[in-house]
Image (cartoon, rainbow, N blue to C red):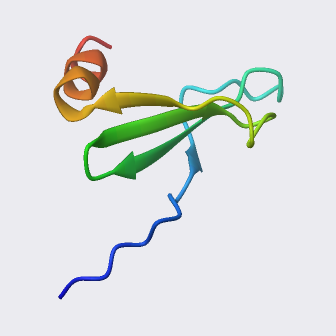
Amino acid sequence: MIAVNPTPHWFKSSYSGGSGTECVECAHVPHGVLIRDSKRPVGPVLSVGTDAWRHFIGAM
């Protein structure tokens, strides 16, 4: 049996600005990616499916 960690591992996006005003954090989860504002870690979280995330990253 494989144990799944229920707490996502958040990391800052490499596209976040260095001034500290526009920080985005992401976390990989089995169904895709979670995205949140690093200044509001208990605020809203956007969940993006794997295929949508691949299309988004591929368009950059």
Q: Position of residue 33 (x, y in %)?
A: 37, 39
Q: Is 8 drawn above or below residue 57 in the view shown?
A: below
User: Which quarter of the rendering shows the N terminus?
Assistant: bottom left
Question: How many marks can you see?
Answer: 0
Residue 60: where, in percent of width, then height? 32, 14
Image point (79%, 34%), residue name: 40
Q: Residue at x 29, y 17 (%)?
A: 56
Left or right of 17? Residue 27 is: left
Relative to 56, 33 lies left or right: right
Q: Position of residue 59 (x, y in %)?
A: 25, 11
* Residue at 57% from the left image edge and 32% from the top image edge: 45
Using the image, determine if residue 28 lies above or below residue 58: below
Image vertical order of residue 42 relative to residue 6, above or below: above
Question: Which residue corresponds to the image point at 21% horizontal and 27% vertical from the top-left?
Answer: 54
Image coordinates for residue 6, horizontal then vertical, percent: 46, 66
Residue in front for this viewpoint, 36 or 3: 3
**Residue 39 occupies which quadrant of the picture?**
top right
In front here: 7 or 14? 7
Residue that protrudes farthest toward the top in the picture: 59
**Image vertical order of residue 14 relative to residue 15, above or below:** below
Front residue of this view, candidates 28 and 1? 1
Give the residue furthest to the bottom.
Answer: 1
